Amino acid sequence: MNGQREAALMTRIDPRELRQVFGKFATGVTVVTYQDDGVPRGATVNSFTSVSLEPPLALVSLDRRSRACGNLHDRPFAINILTAGQRDLALHFAGVPQSSVRDPFTGTDGRDEPPVIRDCLAYIACVPWAVHEAGDHRLFIGEVVDASEGRAAEPRPLGFFGGGFCRVESGERSWAASNELIAAMQQNLSFSW
């Protein structure tokens, strides 16, 4: 590696600038829910990803300073994917109380089961699998024990882009993946130019 490039890589990037750049990647919006001494709790999270199909694993990234981060250790949790009509829920669970949010959870069968957001687009229920420290965040990986598409009246997801909520205006797919591409993705093949 040449000296200039190495020096550039060693320069610390301004966190505000990095946040701006990260914000150019559009994501969905979720609320991660769990039980805290029998009380349903949740936190708005846009840093969620699938990890593995075998075993079935999903990951959420939480700021280490957040209450949810401290409470999620060794607890089952659910990742609730919000619809475009659930912006108030996203704000509420992000710490901006909304008077319109009342009893957002469906019933749970047991004290240890994570609550699920009513009318969400889909949910993924997990049991703890691993936790990893990652800078100012913790990565919670859960083994998926249940997942279901919701019965939401609003079929579009709530999006997050450039520091704000956005709508995915169309459910249409502009391009369809070919069977070859899907097969390659399932085998984790990489492509180069």
Image (cartoon, rainbow, N blue to C red):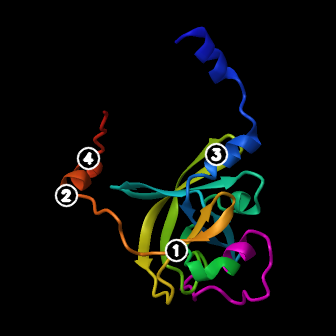
Q: Give how far apart the Cα atoms at labels 2 and 3 are.
A: 33 Å
Q: Give how far apart the Cα atoms at labels 2 and 4 are.
A: 12 Å
| Amino acid type assigned to the residue bearing label 1 in the image | Pro
Q: Secondary structure at mark 4?
A: loop
Image-based side of 147 in relation to 75, left or right:
left
Image-based side of 97 in relation to 180, left or right:
right
* Coordinates of residue 81 in the picture (x, y in percent): 53, 72
Q: Which residue is more in the foreground, 80 or 8?
A: 8
Name the residue located 58 percent from the left edge and 75 percent from the top edge.
Answer: 114
Res 39 seen here = no
Which of the labelled discs sits on residue 179, or is there none? 2
Residue holding disc 1: 157
Q: Give how far apart the Cα atoms at labels 1 and 2 are.
A: 25 Å
**Quarter location, residue 3:** top right
**Quarter location, residue 134:** top right
Characterize the magenta stretch by its predominant secondary structure. Answer: loop
- Mark found first going from the N terminus, 3 or 4: 3
* Coordinates of residue 179 in the picture (x, y in percent): 19, 58
Q: Which residue is more in the foreground, 162 or 138?
A: 162
- Mark found first going from the N terminus, 1 or 4: 1
Q: Nearer the viewer, mark 3 or mark 4?
A: 3
Residue holding disc 3: 21
Which of the labelled discs sits on residue 121, or is there none? none
Mark 3 Cα within 10 Å, few/some/many (few <14, many 20+)?
few
Q: Which residue is more in the foreground, 96 or 6?
A: 6
* Coordinates of residue 149 in the picture (x, y in percent): 42, 79
Q: Secondary structure at mark 1?
A: loop
What segment carries the magenta color? 89-110
Name the residue located 66 percent from the left edge and 77 percent from the top edge.
Answer: 87
Residue holding disc 4: 187
